[in-house]
Image (tube, grey):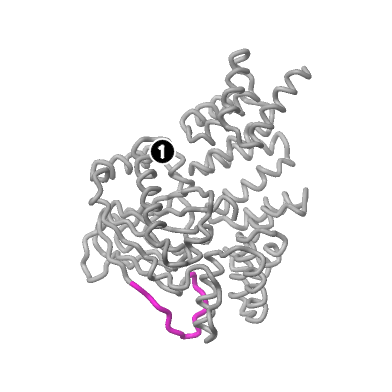
Amino acid sequence: MSDNKNKFKDLESLYELGKFEELKSESLKLIAINENNTDALNALAIAYKNLGDTENAKNIFIKLINSGPKADHIYSNAGNFFYDIGNISNAVKCHEHALKINPKNVNSLNQLGMSFSNMGKDLEAIEYYKKALSLDSKLEAIHHNIGNSYRNLKKYQEASDHYELSHRNLSMCQQLECLYHLGDKDKFYKKLNQQSEKFSSHPLAASLSAHAAIRFDKEDKYSFCNQPFEFINKKNLFDRDDFNDVLINDFISSFNQNKFDKKEQSLLKNGFQSSGNIFLINEKPIQEIKDLILEEIENYKNHYMSFGSDLITQWPEKYTLYGWLIIMNKGGSLGGHMHKEGWLSGSIYLARPTKEGNDDGDLLFSLHGSNYPSDGKSYTTAKVEIEKGTMVLFPSSLFHATIPFNANQQRITLAFDIIPTVN
């Protein structure tokens, strides 16, 4: 019995060290001895997930769930997996089952909060976060997440109070946004200076600083990408040999077959946004477009190397490429927003409705968005015309929006960010 426990600890150690190839190998050895070893199967599924083999990970988690394991962490890990691949409904079922076994499973409490927030049900999400905090009031990730839900509900003071209890760079930037909405100018600038001194540059702080500089007639001293419009890069991907209509159709077909759940997006009209990270799906057309994007991101980085911007000079050493689809129908539009967790953002247009006006369905960049108070000031904008096959890369600090269109056709956008591993 003790030998089995030691073997399980070995699997845990490999996971904590991020040695997923070794975790896979050791798990398979244990499964060869006992094909129903739930701990080894669980570890193997996690290894597959982190190695990008989502199909094998999915099959193992389904096998584990169907076998009715008594351990709550099995359901909890399965729930994490389903959330990441955009299957929120299955994630909820797994985490609810984990809590039936162990009501004190903090991961499942947190993940249920994230799942309900993803569905736009932030009041329910907050209740799960509160239960997790009642078990451990110092959990920074949960203070950050509950802050997000309060912010979504426009309860900015409550959100700010929770962000204060997290030491993450993004948490401090989210708090800055709350203070900005609350109109606390002095505290806003005090916190902005603290963030600038304590952390590396961040796109959200850059957006806020640039907006506040215009609103309050102050100099924008924040360093990230001080001339963001110069860093908008547009390219026709049909100029590449490896991009064509067949790849687009295969990509969309893979997306449809995987049945991603919808994510609540309050700024989106007549359309929906997919949940999860589409690039976790290990299917050929999805991975081909992922590789294409990574290549174009390197080209972008090299092109702007001489510009001397923190966007390039502080480029994250490690990052995740995170992607999702936005599908709009007639009358669709997306209000001005920026990508708070990104560093560099981008979009590829897989379908584009016919123009009935000069700028129907085009992309609009601005220094204003996210319903920030404008005080009647004028904020710089730039329109970018897009066609099917257009790729646009830009700093995540820039607000961007979709101009409404009236054609009875779909507008399908693959949106993506590079997200620093440490944020």
Residue pictured at 61% horizontal, 80% vertical: 183
Residue farthest front in this picture? 306
Residue at image location 25% in from the left, 48% down from the top: 240
Nearer to the camera, 249 or 206: 206
Q: Residue 147, located in which quarter of the rendered image?
A: bottom right
Q: Main secondary structure of the magenta part?
A: loop
- Indicate left or right for 365 with 385 as reference: right
Residue 390 in the image: state x and y as whole percent: 28, 56
358 in the magenta segment: no
Residue at 60% over, 66% down:
173
Q: Secondary structure at mark 1?
A: helix
* Neighbours of disc 1 within 10 Å: few (<14), some (14-19), many (20+): few
Q: Does residue 372 show up magenta in the picture?
A: yes
In the displayed structure, would residue 106 be above or below residue 129?
A: above
Q: How many marks?
A: 1
Q: Amino acid at mark 1?
A: Asn
Question: Measured from the top left, where is residue 128 in percent x and y?
Answer: 67, 50
Q: Is residue 369 above or below residue 413?
A: below
Q: Position of residue 161 (x, y in %)?
A: 71, 66
Residues rendered magenta in the picture: 370-382
Q: Nearer the viewer, residue 302 or 416?
A: 302
Residue at (57% x, 20% y) in the render:
28
Examine the rendered structure and indicate whether residue 56 appears above or below residue 115: above
Q: Quadrant of the N terminus?
A: top right
Which residue does the numbered mark 1 point to in the structure image?
A: 258
